[in-house]
Amino acid sequence: MKIILKTSLLLSLLFTFSMRAQDMKEGFGYLEKGDFAKAETFFSTILKEYPTNKTARLCYARAIGLNQQADKALENFIQLKKEYPGDLEIELNYAESLLWNKKFDDAKVFYTSLVEKYPTNFVAHLGFANTLSNLKEYPEALRNVNKALTLSPGNTGALISRKYIKLGYAYKNVSEKKFTEAETYYDEILKDFPLDKETLMNKANMYLITKEIAKGKEVYNLLAPAQPVIALNGLSLLDHIDKKEKSALELATTSLEKSKTITDESLQKQTKERYTQALIWNKKYKEAYAYIADLKVQYPNENWVLSLSATLDIYKSNFPESITSYKKILENDSKSFDGNLGIANAFKASGLTSKAYQAALTTLEIFKDQGDAMNFIKNMKADFTPYLEEKLTYSFDNGNNTAYASRTLVSIPLSTKWTVNTTYQYRKTENSVTKAAAESNDFLLGATYQFHPKISYTLEAGVNSANSTTTSYTQVLINTYFKLKPMKLQDLEVGFKREMQNFNSDLIDKEIATNNYYLNYNLSTNFNFGWFTQYFFTAQTDNNNRNLLFTSFYYNFMSSPVLKGGLNYQYIAFKDRVPADYFSPKRFNAVELFLEILKDENGIEPKSWFYHANVASGFQFKESDAKEWTYRVQAKLGYKFSDRFLANIYGLRSNIASTSASGFTFNEFGLRLKWKLTSKPLFKLQ
């Protein structure tokens, strides 16, 4: 919130003139009460009879200056200054008229000389403090206003000026993320002006930025007795930040009801806006759509209503419609914050990277150092920053097989469309009973090209080199696929992958390559249900074939952290049964219920924890065998040390027979590290 500094000085301190024969008390009264139009008329009449009277001329100049004629007032004071050189009252009023005309640099020069000539003059120090505050030179402004208060202790005008200087200084500190310093100034103001509305609102706004929920609620509760609607609106937003969406809607609904009794139209609009936002946060899209439709009738083409409509479309993944609404906002006001940053988000969600980046830059040009816009650009740059990922794993099963593996991936975006990568994977397996051991090394080079916002293509190719006690060989590896978004809320991946069977030493010995033709399809909805399906057809070099189908129907119970659960079904069928070599049933079915919780590493701030856990249990049916109980448990826990480095450990345990015989139990533990190799992309985003 931009602080506008009040610069009027107390008239009673400025007018100590001899009244001579003219009685001007009535005119002084108009000035003191702020009735500047009447004061202008009054002194204009006086000057018709006494055109040279210094006091009347000075008061007339003040009246017109404070009645939106600052330029004419300055002309009058310049003339008076010429006629009465060195007159302190005229010089003080001339200096103040420079402030009315926003000539702050000129005012600073003049006030500097005034306080040097009159070091004990209260009005000079107070005017100088106000000037410096307008120039955002807050330390010197505070020094001068404090000097004024030593000259006139407890002076109401000086205390009010100090309040606005400290509000401006606090706002500057908030912009610079110096929140402790800002908090100190807010607390100092509240000592002078307990429960001051402006200060409490600014302090609460800071806690919204810092996401200090408890402190924010404490401030809004202080506001509540005098400003219940403002307090409820703020508390609703705090609950949204705290992921308590139901409570946010309850508070917003109460606020909406209370707002019917107030006359402040601006606050009524803010309350209707918060209520609509709360409906959207709670995914009550039908109610939000109907309410916005009514608002469009009441407030046609108003930006805040257009912004609500655009937000609703973002939540519903109607990105083209959202962009249309933001364009209307910018037609109404090209400097709208909601319009500029909103359309940046809509462009990004639509895959229009360059347009999103340019819109965010435009936002920063208008709103210098604005936190949300800076974070948006930082996150966009992070998406295109080179990184290295290292994964170390150890696994074992009840068939006496153990394996150590490492995987190193380096990804380097060359532009918003091109990314190249290289992967090296080492795996060593052995069996403690048979003493069979083998090693394999995979090396891949790849590239991804985004040739449409909704379509990308990836090609990776390389070699596998394997060695065991009985054989050694080299085989070609290929991984190629398209990723598409055929319709909103849908994701489709279609590809081909050639890989080597390297689960254990025996499989490496057999030199079996698998050619996998696959597709992955995910359908999300706006009502929390989702459906994921995966299909593989695999042709193996041992002349066996495999069909694999996996499908999952799930429900999202929460969005932050993500909590979902559902039903999984898996079907596997091989052309030939070769149980001596590997798990290859003619028919295999598995059904399980699962529950999953996720706090994603990409959505958290540095110095935060992230996690992922999945538990599932059900039954598997292998050919004509009796059903068997199955379970699967996997978990990940990590820490984001900085914007450029994170790490996590993970583990899993499963007895499902998808990859081996019945009675099989598999365990794996690992460590993953991820570094951003540079602080920004290697190319210039544009």
Image: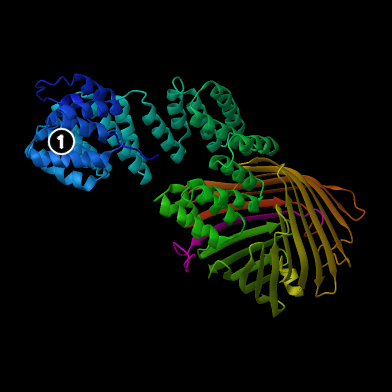
- Was residue 680 drawn as part of the magenta stretch in this picture? yes
Question: Could you tell me residue 156's position as x and y percent?
Answer: 24, 24
Image side of residue 328 versus residue 75, left or right = right
Q: Is residue 222 above or below residue 463?
A: above
Q: Nearer the viewer, residue 188 or 421?
A: 188
- Was residue 590 drawn as part of the magenta stretch in this picture? no
Q: Is residue 412 visible?
A: yes
Image side of residue 493 versus residue 639, left or right = right
Q: Nearer the viewer, residue 117 or 423?
A: 117
Image side of residue 46 versus residue 543, left or right = left
Q: Is residue 148 visible?
A: no
Q: Residue at x 79, y 57 (%)?
A: 658
Image side of residue 141 versus residue 608, left or right = left
Q: Secondary structure at mark 1?
A: helix
Q: Nearer the viewer, residue 56 or 174?
A: 56
Question: Could you tell me residue 207's position as x and y percent?
Answer: 43, 36
Q: Residue at x 58, y 70 (%)?
A: 418
Q: Identify the image quadrant of residue 291.
A: top right
Question: Could you tell me residue 338's position as x and y percent?
Answer: 51, 46
Q: Is residue 340 above or below residue 448?
A: above
Amino acid type, mark 1:
Leu
Q: Nearer the viewer, residue 516 or 420?
A: 420
Q: Which residue is denoted by mark 1 in the rendering?
A: 92
Question: Could you tell me residue 565's position as x and y percent?
Answer: 72, 43
Q: Residue at x 82, y 60 (%)?
A: 548
Q: Which residues are magenta?
A: 662-686
